[in-house]
Amino acid sequence: MAFRLKLVPQDTRIDFFRWQFVTFGISSAMAILSVVVLVIYGLNFGIDFRGGTTIRTESTQPVDVGVYRQALSPLGLGEVAITQVYDPGFRADQHVAQVRISAQEGAESVTPETVAAVEAALKTVDPAVSFPSVESVGPKVSGELIQTAIYAVLASLIAISIYIWLRFEWQFAAGAIVSLLHDVLITMGVFALFQIRFDLTTIAALLTIVGYSINDTVVVFDRLRENLMKFKKRALREVMNLSVNETLSRTVMTSGTTLVALIALLVLGGDVIRGFVFAITFGIVIGTYSSIYVAKNVVLWLGVKRDWSKKDRSDDGSPFSGAEAP
Amino acid sequence: MLQIDRWKRILIIGICLLGLAYAMPNLFYKRVEAHNDAVAAIEKTGVTTPELVEARDGWPGWLPNGLVNLGLDLRGGAHLLGEVQVDQVYKARMDSLWPELRRALADERATIGAVRRVASPEGTLKIEIGTPEQLARAVEIVRGFSEPVTTLTGAGQTSLAIDAQGKALTISLSDAEKSLTDDRTIQQSLEIIRRRVDEVGTREPTIMRQGEDRILIQVPGIGSAAELKALIGTTAKLTFNAVIGTGSDPDARVGIGEIVLPASDREGVFYTIDETPVVTGEELTDAMPSTDQNGMPSVDFRFNPTGARKFGAYTSANVGQPFAIVLDNQVISAPVIRQAITTGSGQISGSMDYEEATRLAVLLRAGALPAELTFLEERTVGPELGQDSIDAGQIAATVGFVAVIVLMVLSYGLLGVFAAVALAVNMGMIFGVLSMIGATLTLPGIAGIVLTIGMAVDANVLVFERIREELRTARGPARAIELGYEKAMSAIIDANITTLIIAAILFVLGSGPVKGFAVTLTIGIVTSVFTALYVTRLMTITWFERARPRQIEV
């Protein structure tokens, strides 16, 4: 036998429901905790969602956040956040910081004077500083972006539940939605807890997580549907366990390859998209978990139609349908 | 049986080769870009210089020359979202209607009595007449100025909305006319911004309408966004007005139809001028930077015949009086008319440097924006940061790619090698499709590609795992492979359609970088299903036919 890397042993007979109240309890607790964290800490919205300006500074001199702050304080800009940015890809004399200024009172659009004043002030304390990127979003646009983001998340959840409902049964759609909400809430909770910047690309990341998680869930559901037709007499719980075990190797393998690629991007992809990549990476871990431990539990509780019509079976086209194979 | 028709094989290989051929120019990005630029330059100017020819011949013309457009976050450049203040046009329309209306109403003074304009909200025109009983007659006269408006929603609408109460008439633009005017204002603004950006000569600017009254401007490769904004953010509304008085009080009381404007070069000096201009910048035919008699930077301009006639008539009637040259609500100079100017040309001098004079000339040539533009969103990225992002993305993609291949080969042996080849073809095809449709690659788009690297093998994993399972039922390897592909199909389809739904929503609702992500994700899904299902299958079957193994190991 040639060597084969097996992330999962060949035949697993794990009872995924054995600790179902513990796992589902933990999931529920995490989701609720995330809501609490979201309410208490709130999200660290980027300028996309609350307006304002971010200026990226780059200098050959080390960044002293205190000095920067002092230079900017006479300008009376209100809330100013200065953070130093680190990345393994930076050159030794490359020192980067991010200056974020909240939207100025009463200004409907971007104020170039503010940006010019900030740049001039920073130049006085560090003549070597340059500004590789400046982004400003007016409060009018940021309000619309919030709306768009909420629509996007809702639209994706609705579209997916309709698709699952059409392809499977409404119980499956319910299970899928619960697991998606679980993934999205917990990811947002982590963003709130660690105050990671939450902006438009984070929404794109959330939707990607939704896409990946549903992908995983669908593969399990698909096998479940097949097995439900195959083993008409067995208990639903047993058939579910069998389906998850049969697809476990694929679930782990796909998560593995995706994570490997994403971790490469997380470490080497530069600091500009790190928040985005972090959200996706985290979401994929949580999405894999939820497709095993959350989605099908909901389906189990809701019960499912066992009597699949003849028409459905012919779609499958498998010569094994109905056979009690091992 | 385990086989693929010959025509299908040719089709699969053909599609792969086509995709790779379209992707290839991206490997020689600089050279192809120079070639494309040279071809465009030769076509545009008709001039062929040795440098252009050399650049053009750097890439054979018969090869595909489409490139992946790099987004602003990768190439560097400026992104501006401006909102056109369409309301200003309503005001201008009402203000220009007033003199004509006054004349028409004055002709009927005998019946309707004295006419005067009274203060009213911006964009409306309120007129009081001396004889309230004759209001109906006045309405009739005003209605004569109202033109029929044809819209999609219905005919029978006219351009003016007239509200008569007591002795006052309030006139404004009707809703139908407003929406038509808005449309025209945006179109004009787009055209003028395009002309101005073209004058600066940067490559491939994107200037498009967004939503009702917004304009999106993306100019790649521009170093200073401030300069771009000065160029497109300036209304450049030039007018020549009669001066009524000079003073130092910005809140001086003025009559109806008069306005107080500051001097641009002297602090604390304010001019009271007649709001209705004698001539406007629209009647200019040319403008160019020059110097005045003191050697200071100035701008020479020439009027078209109607402008020249109006200006000549006004200056000959007002010798010895000052007139104001007004640019964007600031008086840039207010010279005294020494003699009638009938030549139709003139000079604007004020306190400006050469750079400003050049810019003003560009602005005057391109024409004034019909309304002011305010900026709602502004993003600029320096080219170095963009290059850093490209480099980092390349390294990350390569490392991710190699790691996934190692994982696949270790797990599935020879079939894993097939999957790896398919993955490489997949990468090529993504770039091929991106180049073919001229899509834009953004930084999140690179993340989308890396994500695709990880997820693309999913279809293969599903198939291979299925083959493994089927092998255990011991029906022979050929049957196992066939069943593996067959049975994994429904899971693959379902899984990918759900991801496509997400990508579609991102595409519709996202903008800029997020849209770029949606595009690469979508293309990645389609190409990865193609490569995973057809390309690996073709390789597997071809190998199987050659080797005829009794048993296979997956």
Image (cartoon, rainbow, N blue to C red):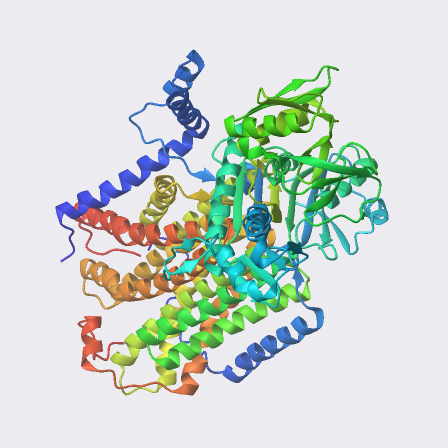
Q: Is residue B460 left or right of residue A85?
A: left
Q: How many badges with numbers are in the image?
A: 0
Q: Nearer the viewer, residue A237 or B453?
A: B453
Q: Is residue A236 left or right of residue B212?
A: left
Q: Looking at the image, which residue is at 36% across and 68% down?
A: A219
**Residue A270 is drawn in which quadrant?**
top right
Q: Is residue B368 above or below residue B350?
A: below
Q: From this viewpoint, is residue A14 visible?
A: no
Q: Is residue A135 left or right of residue A153?
A: right
> Which quarter of the rendering shows the N terminus of chain B?
bottom left
Residue drawn where x is 52% and y is 46% of the image:
B216
| Picture layout, residue B16 above or below residue A4 | above
| Residue B250 seen by the camera | yes
**Which residue: 25% across, 82% down?**
A308
Front residue (pair B187, B239): B239
For this rendering, which residue is in front, B155 or A88? B155
Question: Residue A97 location in percent, x, y?
Answer: 72, 45
Q: Position of residue B11 (x, y in %)?
A: 20, 44
Give the percent coordinates (x, y) of residue B33.
Answer: 43, 28
Q: Is residue B316 above or below residue B152?
A: above
Q: The C terminus of chain B is located in which quarter? A: bottom left
Q: Position of residue B244 (x, y in %)?
A: 74, 38
Which quarter of the figure has residue A299? bottom left
